[in-house]
Amino acid sequence: MTAEPQEQALHASPTEVRRVRSHGQMIAAAVILGLGLVLVVLSIVMYDTLVELSSTYRGRRGGLRDAVAPGAVLLSAGAAVGGLVWLLVWSYRWERVATGTVLKQQASSYLALPSHEASAVRDRLAGGDPRVYLPLPLTNKGDVVFSVWLARADRVAYVGVAGRNGREWAALPLARLEGPSYEAISRLAVDHYGARASQTIVNGFVSGLFSD
């Protein structure tokens, strides 16, 4: 399976982070899958009963007569398929190799920049100074993508940047931010990346440098 552009840098940094199955998500997905399969069987077995029951609908509900039975089968099948996709595709998480701390994606966006500027964006973010890396030209689609992942328990942030190379994405090495650089970036939301750093963020970053 091809990695999402936002996760390319994570896949390219196996000594720093790793992708593992989430037992909690696997259990939840298995429950949805199992429930969906049971409902599929029941809706098929009881198909004629559902048709008979829906035939008594009158008034506003009358238009639903022909849809109840097949709708029950389709909805049940949809739940089963959703559970299967969740189990096979989405039931994973990223964690730090060093500590096992789970990473949470804080921000992710395409940037309105040509792919050859990906390195410059990564260098700006890696420096950790919000006065330097903000603002970023956020867009819905572009040739450069960035993402920020937080390991809050470790007070560590990872910044990934990738540039489009034809149909593929070339990921740059993950940048790790700690100390005042982590404190500054951890307080941002995805919308904040498109604006200059607020004075509060700048003051917190600068005071953190001196306190260290």
Image (cartoon, rainbow, N blue to C red):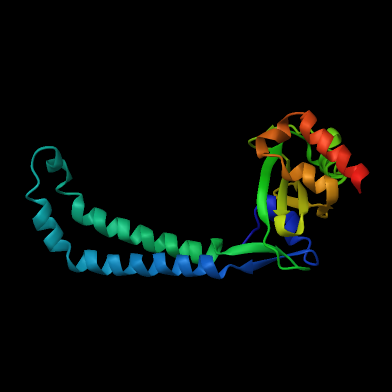
Q: Residue furthest front?
A: 211
Give 81 or 192, whichever is nearer the viewer. 192
Any part of residue 171 in sight: yes
Q: x%, y% of residue 136? A: 76, 34
Residue lying at 78% horizontally and 46% vertically, measured from the top left: 183
* Image quadrant in which you'd find residue 30: bottom left
Which residue sits at x=67%, y=39%?
189
Is 130 left, or right, of 145 in this rendering?
right
Query: Which residue: 69% across, 49% down?
Result: 167
Whether residue 120 is visible: no
- In the image, 183 versus 47, the foreground residue is 183
Q: Position of residue 153 (x, y in %)?
A: 72, 59
Query: Looking at the image, is 45 positioned above or below residue 166?
Result: below
Q: Quadrant of the N terminus?
A: bottom right
Q: Position of residue 165 (x, y in %)?
A: 76, 47
Quadrant in which residue 63 is drawn = top left
Residue closer to the observer: 159 or 200 = 200
Q: Quadrant of residue 38?
A: bottom left
Q: Does residue 118 appear to the left or right of 112 in the view shown? A: right
- In this rendering, the count of numbered labels is 0
Which residue sits at x=37%, y=70%?
A: 34
Q: Tell whether 50 sits left or right of 161.
A: left
